[in-house]
Image: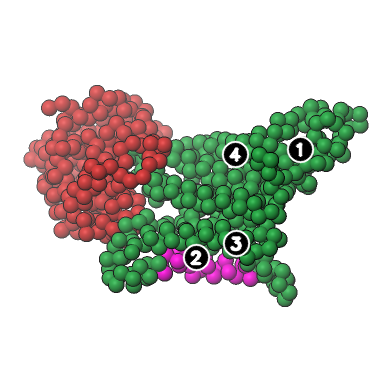
Amino acid sequence: MTKRHVEIAVYAIFIAAIMLAPLVLEPFWLNRIAKYLVYGMLGIAVALSWGYAGVLNLGQGLFFGAGAYMLAMSLKLASPTSLQQGSDTPVPDFMLWNAEPGSKTDLCCINKASFLWIPFQNQWFGVAMGILLPVCIAAVIGIILFRKRIAGVFISIITLALVLLVRLLIIDAQPVTNGFNGLTDLGWFKLFDFEFDPYLVQTYYLVAGSLAVVLVAARLLIETRAGLILQAIRDDPNRARYLGFDVPRFQTFFFTVSAGIASFAGMLYVIAAEFASPTFMDLSFSISMVVWAAVGGRASILGACIGAILINTITASVSETKGFAETWKAIIGLIFVLVVLYLPRGLAGFAHDIADWFVARVNGSPHRAAAREADGVQPAE
Amino acid sequence: MPVALTVDGLSVDFDGFKAVNTVSMIVDQGELRVLLGANGAGKTTLMDLISGKTKSTAGRVFLYDTDITNKEEHEIARSGIGRKFQIPSVFKDLTVRRNLEVVSCRNTGVLSNLGFGFSHEGEERVDEVLELIGLTGQAAMVAANLSHGQTQWLELGMLMMQNAKLLLLDEPTAGMTQAETLKTSKIINALKGKHTLLVVEHDMAFVREIAERITVMHLGQVLAEGNVAQIEQNPKVREAYLGSRAIS
């Protein structure tokens, strides 16, 4: 038995657990857990860019939000209220509340920018834009930042500023985005003729299945040669450069993949939560993602994913328990401080140590097992 | 013997300060050339110029017939120049074996590396190089845990894996014990012939051990060129370097 077997088993157990959850959970909790699984997907995105590429993106919410808004625009037009605005074609209700008197009730000309909504009448346009827009934004940001060899804390500051900038723009573009209020009262996502009511078990499976696919794909991605080169670049970009690797290209690629995962998560969130709002681009939300990954273990795809799900589940339970209602934030903060102090590699690092011990015990020869285990890629400190 | 490296009138001007001033040199294929000079003579800057870290303000550099003047670092590396830094730099969170495997990826693009595993020849070469640098026993060790000397050897091993035509080695024995220096000179002697080498070094005992031809630099310019005996007897070198005493 090797550590690899243990690892595969842990992945399999996790996927089985999220697939079997509907057997024991009622719809209310199922919908909640679905949202937390979406956060788990964000944990994967953070682990990929922070843990493996060494790029601490404090603006991951930008991509999450962009994905969410793109799909929400389509679902808003699919909402029954959008059809009851006195036009043949669907029109978002909020647009008419603020429209100038006498303006036409058609997406073409309610206000100057309302025409942007026209193609979103097709749900699949929203889905396509939900991936394409964030991925293109990420690629452009990545090319500029990485070609200029900006690294470390400067990337964090720039991405942080960007997400706040976009948040401001969205709030400011009230006539087309409904500003602070975001997009609410959405229709359901449709696949063929099936409607994904957020409280249906099928919706849960849509999210859980997506998470399982993203989890395995991200894990396989870092197992490729490109994933190994990426980790080498994280450790020493200059060394990699003088070995002939085009460093910015690798960084941009993985930064963009991470953004793509975040935007996919944003779309799933809209399906499960039925709204999109500027809070997705709040600073606190992007920071929370980093905290989830830090607690779960940023150098572990699954660790960061579980960290996100765990923290959110604990937050929900604690904040709703009488007696903790006032103090729950302190409890979450305490957990975070303890993990950072005593488990710098996060829960995943702790689990790795247990797995080492377990493998060594099963094989009876700790020395050999440790040597074999070390063959695997080591997580960053 | 074909010429591996041609440096022609290379200069760099840092706001009026010429760290390297119209340096010209020719290194034959398979040669081991030592760059000698006091601190600030421009040795490391010359390597920076050749490897693309610093852009030159005048002059040209050719690797065989390819003009590599002022290209990007990774392009110069791909055209066949490997570089070892003064401060050893390896991928410290990866194991020794992984460090070498990274270099065994012959394609340097992202998409061409989206596959799994390494070529059979690549793996064999990794074993060979591990043997050459004497780190077979440490293959599974994380590079951060290697000793200073072992880290230097690993970096040399990565250059061997890279299979570059020209290797630039910046003080490969800096901070090494005598035994480690001896082993390093063995590794470097093994590289001779297969690769063309340009080595910056201060340690004269080590230079005598490995050098064929020496180029002495002083204040950004080439002061003298010749074999060990010629350089040790050269009055200009003596004066510039040590007042009137001999190099020891």
**Residue drawn at (48%, 49%), measured in percent from left and top?**
A218
- Element carrying mark 1: helix
**Residue drawn at (37%, 59%), measured in percent from left and top?**
A4
How far apart are the alpha carbons under marks 3 and 1?
A: 32 Å
Q: Is residue A119 left or right of residue A175?
A: left
Amino acid type, callout 1: Leu
Quarter of the image with the C terminus of chain A is bottom left
Quarter of the image with the N terminus of chain A is bottom left
Quadrant in the rendering for residue B168: top left
Does the magenta-highlighted stretch encompass residue A347? Answer: yes
Mark 3 and mark 2 residues within 8 Å of each other at the beta carbon:
no
Q: What is the number of the mark on residue A347?
A: 2
How far apart are the alpha carbons under marks 3 and 2?
A: 22 Å
Q: Earlier in the sequence, mark 3 or mark 1?
A: 3
Q: What is the number of the mark on residue A77?
A: 1
Circle 4 packing at 10 Å, graded few (<14), some (14-19), many (20+), is: many
Mark in the foreground, 3 or 1: 3
Chain under numbered label 1: A
Amino acid type, callout 3: Ala
Which region shows up in magenta?
Answer: A331-354
Q: Is residue A304 visible?
A: no
Circle 1 packing at 10 Å, graded few (<14), some (14-19), many (20+), is: many
- Element carrying mark 3: helix
